[in-house]
Image: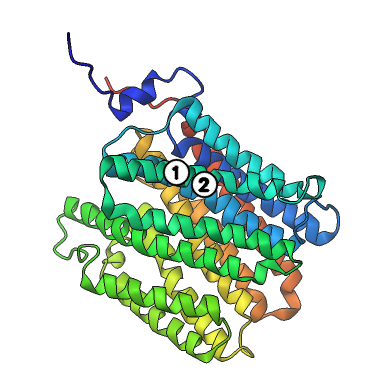
Amino acid sequence: MAPIMKKTTSEQSRAWKGPAIFSFGFRPFFLFGAVWAALAMLVWILMLSGRFMLPTRLDPVSWHAHEFLFGYLGAIIGGFLLTAVPNWTGRLPVVGWHLAGLFGLWVGGRAAVATSELWPVGVAEAVDLSFLVALGAFILREIIAGKNWRNLVVLVLLTVFTLANLLFHIEAARGDLAAQGVGLRIGVAAVILLIAVIGGRVVPSFTRNWLVSRKSEQLPVPPMQRFDKVVILATVFALLLWIARPEHALTGAALLVIGLLHLGRLFRWQGGQTLSEPLLWVLHLAYAFIPLGALVEGAAILRPDLLPAASAQHLWMAGAFGLMTLAMMTRATLGHTGQTLHAGAGSLAIYVCLVASVLARLAPAIWEGQAATLYALSGALWIGAFVGFAVFYGPALMQPKPVRQ
């Protein structure tokens, strides 16, 4: 009897005869995650203006925070891990109806949270959590089967992120302002650490590969050296303080320290040599929002009269999280759909829109009299960035990868 040959990732994806968007994990989650980031912002603007209200038990601010942190980011984290984990473990990806089922759980969560007032208490919350729980179960299965213990830290952070979502719902059910609660801070901390761990691997690696191809003599320090591990451990300590005592002076000082440490880490990656390639410098800029957020958040804690902490947090949530996900989405889409790894004018435009959105959101701290206009501008630029991604990258995400002759 002839041996049964195991299909490669590409062969399994091509064997799927259904919609191309379910042929790889990044496709549905990147495309519709971007659509949701734009749509949820539009709904948020309408809610702020009083023209529209969702039948949700979450207050408007908490719904807005939840749907970015756990809704949008949940989708992008899912798309990234469903694509990356098979590469880490050497096993086959989730494709076809199994992938469609996972995607359906995410969509169901968005609908359930938006209409939670219409359901018995606990139903919408359970539906919302089901996607992250199922994603975590898949990651655990793959790590165990592939004995890929090195990436167990990613599963731990995903578990923390899931528990943060649960705590967010519990705080909201108690009548607390969940947008300022412990659940949100834990979720933010988990994503910061995901970027520190995964971004700390891929940003210097991608940069090194590009610089080597151009015969540069100055290359990034290899990822995850002793200094990197010290920075990550210090970040865990500082974020635990921020979660537990967000207004304490020691927390502010700790955030200032890790801000400087992350700047030192970023400096070692030779980002200044990547200015001719937006697909690379955007990764460095996105990571830079991690130390900038820590420095400004720390300063806001120590001197709350100078800058509101909520504004400072947007450097993390909109700046680091928004720009890093957009950068990874564009790069992964180009690479996995057979296109050249180069950011064209359209990609550059969406990066600029996102960065301008962050700056416009922070500007009211300086120009208070223009707050309403600046907030509207920030929202419009945010929508433009993610609609731009859907327009420029949507066709490639919905079509099969071209077969090389």
Residue 274 in view of the camera: yes
Pointer 2 with pointer 1, Cβ within 8 A = yes
Q: Residue at x 46, y 75 (%)?
A: 239
Colour logic: rainbow
Q: Quadrant of residue 261?
A: bottom left
Picture quarter with the C terminus? top left
Above-or-below relation of 403 to 337: above
Q: Is residue 276 left or right of residue 304?
A: left
Q: Is residue 349 left or right of residue 14?
A: right
Q: Amino acid at mark 2?
A: Val
Above-or-below relation of 156 to 397: below
Q: Secondary structure at mark 2?
A: helix
The circle on residue 137 is: 1
Q: Where residue 392 sits: x, y (%)? A: 51, 40
Above-or-below relation of 101 to 320: above
Q: Amino acid at mark 1?
A: Ala
Closer to the camera in the image, 188 or 347: 188
Q: Residue at x 63, y 75 (%)?
A: 310
How many neighbours does mark 2 have within 10 angstroms: few (below 14), some (14-19), or many (20 or more)?
some
Q: Is residue 84 left or right of residue 385?
A: left
Picture quarter with the N terminus? top left
